[in-house]
Amino acid sequence: MKHAAIFASAIAAAALLAAPAASAGERHRPSGEEKLAKMLKGRVAGKPQSCINAYPVRTLKIIDGTALVYKSGSTIYVNVPRDPESLDDKDILVTRRSGSALCRMDSVTTIDRGHGAYTGNIFLGDFVPYTKEG
């Protein structure tokens, strides 16, 4: 009987030691909203715009299920499309513009980066500029 109690105590202790190891191995994966909030920290939203100049847009970042983020100089433009949950950073965006500006009504097709297959269309919303405070 004494051995059973010791064995049960040893199992309980091992379980307690293993629990933190399991949770330490699991890392918090930030949501798209958390990633966007981090990018916009210290910035102030401006008036939404239906178009932005396509050049000199330096970078485009797709935030899964949340938004498209365009950077031009020190300004970050956030575009939340009609169905943001369809955004996937593994996709390539093919944009068909009618001029030198990128506009809310432009057609954006998504292509799977690995297979080159069509995955859908994105319908852009307004572009909200974010500039640094101060």
Image (cartoon, helix red, strand yellow):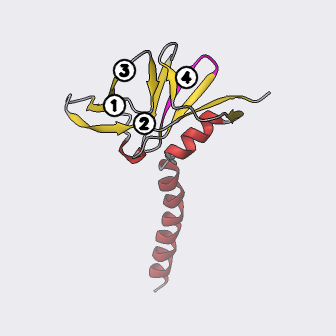
* Residue 12 pos. (x, y %): 50, 71
Query: Magenta stretch?
Result: 68-74
Q: CA distance from mark 1 to mark 2?
A: 8 Å
Q: Which mark is residue 33?
A: none
Disc 1 versus disc 3: nearer the observer: 3
Circle 1 residue: 108
Disc 2 versus disc 3: nearer the observer: 3
The earlier-in-sequence mark between 4 and 2 is 4
Q: Which amino acid does the dot numbered 3 rest on?
A: Ser
Circle 4 residue: 71
SS class, disc 1 = strand
Q: Which mark is residue 98?
A: 3
Disc 4: CA contacts within 10 A as few (<14), some (14-19) or many (>=20): some
- The quadrant of the picture occupied by the C terminus is top right
* Residue 6 pos. (x, y %): 50, 76
Disc 4 versus disc 2: nearer the observer: 2
| Position of 49 relative to 24 (above/below) | above
SS class, disc 3 = loop
- The quadrant of the picture occupied by the N terminus is bottom left
The earlier-in-sequence mark between 4 and 3 is 4
SS class, disc 2 = loop
Q: Are marks 1 and 2 in contact (CB under 8 Å)?
A: yes
Q: Which mark is residue 124?
A: 2
Q: CA distance from mark 4 to mark 1?
A: 18 Å
Instruction: Look at 51% across and 16% down and name the residue there.
Output: 58
Q: Which amino acid does the dot numbered 1 rest on?
A: Val
The earlier-in-sequence mark between 1 and 3 is 3
Disc 4 versus disc 1: nearer the observer: 1
